[in-house]
Image (spheres, rainbow, N blue to C red):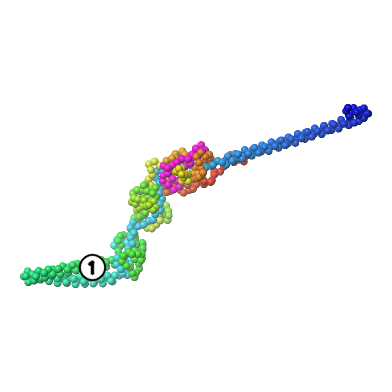
Amino acid sequence: MSHAQRHSSIGIHGLHQHEGAHNIKRIRLLRRARWAALGVLLVLGAGAALVMTERAAQAKALAASTQENAKVHVYVVSPRPGRGQQTLQLPGSLQGYIETPIYARSSGYIKQWFKDIGARVNKGDLLAEIATGEIEQQLAEARANRAQVQSNLQLARTSFERWQGLRARDAVSQQELDERQNTLKLVQANLAASEAVVQRLELQLSYNRIVAPFSGVVTKRNIDVGSLVDAGNGGAPKLLFTLSQTDVLRLYVSAPQSFAPRIKAGQEAQVTLSELPGQTFTGKVVRTAGAIDPATRTLQVEINLPNPDGKLLPGSYVQVALQAAGADKPLLTVPNNGLLFRPEGTLVATVVDGKVQLKKVTLGRDLGVRIEIQSGLSPQDKLIINPPDSLAEGDAVVASEAPVPANNKEGGKEGGKDSAKDGAKEGPGKDAKPEPQPAKAERSAS
């Protein structure tokens, strides 16, 4: 029996209505609790979905950033054809066509000098006189000895002629005549010796006059009146003058071995001086050494330079430009910072469809910041400059054209005139990377 039937049987009627009202309130509370729990679950589900979505986006961005950072950014350039002629710049020093140090041939004191430094002299002009009193006395003694021998010769000849007459009359023996003849010959020999001594001393005495051996300019004077000089050229204190012929100047330059086969006699050479800006003097290659110096691996080249007005001074430091004839077909040239030296040989790294392709090349002449490639490369290749040492075949790279300086858009000259800036600004360092593109930056930021 239910509570309501029991209550009705005993006459209790108010409890049924009270319990119904109480159940309605409970139902309402349960309903509200249900809706609240549902709202909390919805909120938690939305938060969890939001967190999962954000984490997925972050993971995707991290993967994209990792993939982007894994790419190697490189600069590439195209090989350039070399020129048919290269200008070779070499330093040199001018010197007189003839430069002669003048020494004394007789000892004595400087009596007088007549030409000072900078004086132009002609061949045979008197430069200085030496007081040679001892030689003069020796010459006087030799002349006196010669006169004495000449007297003895006259006596010996007279005696021999007399003994010849006596022998004809058989008054003396043949032995005595032969002795007189030998005496005559001995005195004749003594006279010849005395004459030679006189001539030697006369020649030595003539050396007291120091004369110019050729026409030129006096560039040094190391004596003064009263200076004691010795015969010979044993050292600098005995040097009297230095004479230089300057109407034609001579200079020697050392050409690198790589240019040696292209330098021939008869080629023109352009000579410039820093103290004479804007002026160029033209000389000519007259001869080469014909052999490479093993110590420096260079070829000595002699150049003659006309100097009729004397504007160029011997001893000046100059720059010489030689036009070295090139090959019949110019070779390709690349920057020397684009080479890889591996155990398998010399390689270059090129980019083909975003992948690295290593090519073995044969090197030619070293032109400074660029180098010739004889084989292994084509003009259409894209060469990586400053390639990392870890670069391998098939690596994925992002290639960008190397920036060209505004003052070097047409490229530096080949050979000796190749600008140093060409190699310095050809591309970045090995660890440098191109700046990211704006699209990539926006994608990473998203």
Between 253 and 268, the one nearer to me in the picture? 253
Q: Is residue 285 above or below residue 66?
A: below
Magenta region includes residue 368: yes
Q: In the displayed structure, would residue 235 be above or below residue 44?
A: below
Instruction: Work out which quarter of the rendered image holds the N terminus and state it.
Output: top right
**Hey, which quadrant is residue 16 in on the image?**
top right
Name the residue rendered at 43%, 40% in the picture: 376
In the image, residue 402 lies at what x, y percent?
A: 50, 43
Q: Which secondary structure is most common in the magenta stretch?
A: strand
**Residue 244 or 178: which is nearer the viewer?**
178
Side of 57 relative to 349 (left or right): right
Q: Residue furthest right?
A: 11
* Start-end of magenta stretch: 348-374
Name the image quarter holding the C terminus.
top right
The three-letter code of the residue at mark 1 reads Val
For mark 1, what is the residue? 197
Q: Is residue 343 above or below residue 131?
A: above
Q: Is residue 426 visible?
A: yes
Q: Residues within 10 Å of mark 1 (few under 14, many from 20)?
A: some
**Residue in the image at 88% along x and 28% along y:** 2
- Residue at 37% from the left image edge and 47% from the top image edge: 262
Residue 169: percent from left, percent from top: 6, 70
Drawn side of residue 400 relative to residue 123, left or right: right
Q: Residue furthest front?
A: 1
